[in-house]
Image: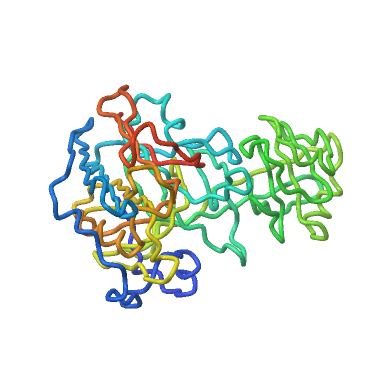
Amino acid sequence: MARRRFGWFAAITSASLIAGLLTTFANPGTANAAACLPDTKLLNKTPVSSFNLPQGAHVRIWDTGVLARWQDDVRIAVVTIPRGSLTPTIATSPTLSRATPTSAMVRSDPSSVVAINADHFNPAVGGIPNVAQISKGKINKLSAASGNDPWQFGMAVYSDTKSIINATARLAGSVSSSSGAVSLTAVNWQTLKPAGITVYTSAWGTYPHPTGLRTIVVSAGVVVAVKAGKAATVRPKANEQWLTASPGTSAAKYLSGLRLGQLVSVTYRLTGSHVGDPYPHQPIGTPTGFVGVGGFILRAGVNRASCDARSESRRPRSAIAWTRSGDLLVVSVSDPHDRGTRSGGATVHQWANILAKLGAVDGVNLDGGTSTTLWVRRSIGGALIRLDQATSSSERPVVNAFSFRAA
């Protein structure tokens, strides 16, 4: 199946879906650019540093240095990855509920030349990614369409074609036994769905997960245990699938009828499609990875970011963007001196303009604030070097990252 390097948004016609999916996205013209904070002039200057990475990748860094008003200190770091060179993958923390610094995710992989933080996550729940997570072809977290989250928008990574494509992801699955079949509506989700069965696996981690009144433990296709209460919230073993459902639902009634030794089949798969032109959209296929993202802030060269109060906050930010020729830009903007989320950096509108000035025509926002972290290796197996701040700066644990490998 032919795959485009990036997706477009013109074919999406539902304004309500767009608004719900892309919190930083605004229709062209809705932002009063004159009311936005002025852009930094930093890119008008010569980079303070530039150097090459393996397979043609290249680093440029702009830095204001220490200004009289230190809150205005800014560093912009951009890695240009030529189309078809480095191989994109998704790096993850050991489990969904255990956040880990980006550098720790890629330190043991000497071929990881570039790494940047990816999905937004909920730090109050141990660090659960907000949306889906697929890594190395394995579904770690995913849900079916529902009224609360009909789409899961993010980036699908195809290591075989060295491409990243904007896409939607959804779960299709079922639980079957001699008692019949019921829909499986979520894998390792942070809440129980109002319908269907949710399965928890060892990928969840040790943080207590939600549970209904009854949890069925399946191993090798057989019910091996029935759990309730606190015992039903601990981490499943590697060979186990824990099935539970919201109380009072038909799925909960189905689970209440399962017995020890009964044969049970638990199956699920990824569905979804690429987003944007050409239409009709291609099916998502079998990506090697998928993570949620913050949404387009730059589309076809147009700044789509708003200037509302939240978006006008200056803070560190990270993004992936594409040039017209299809080269990839991995970019961060930050206060280079490790002084928190409210100094340095850029507003969302400034951020989109920065991406455009760097030559991007499309740009997608990643997690920001203290999550912003950009690492490179100047040679395969070389030391990791941090670009957004000093290598010795503190690094916030996150749940997943984009890793670009020399392979």
Residue 263 shows in the view: yes
Q: Position of residue 103 (x, y in %)?
A: 42, 32
Q: Position of residue 264 (x, y in %)?
A: 75, 40
Q: Does 55 sit left or right of 5 as displayed?
A: left
Query: Can you name the residue that lies furthest to the front here?
Result: 68
- Residue at screen point 45% across, 38% down: 395
Q: Does 360 sit left or right of 98 as displayed?
A: left
- Residue at screen point 36% across, 63% down: 276
Q: Nearer the viewer, residue 96 or 214?
A: 96
Q: Nearer the viewer, residue 170 or 320?
A: 320
Q: Position of residue 405 (x, y in %)?
A: 33, 32
Q: Is residue 19 above or below residue 250?
A: below
Q: Does 335 sit left or right of 223 as displayed?
A: left
Q: How many marks?
A: 0
Q: Does 69 sit left or right of 266 as displayed?
A: left
When asked about the image quadrant of residue 252, the answer is: bottom right
Task: Assign the C terminus to one quadrant of the image.
Answer: top left
Residue 404 shows in the view: no
- Residue at screen point 78% across, 51% down: 180
Q: Position of residue 190 (x, y in %)?
A: 65, 51
How is this picture coloured?
Answer: rainbow
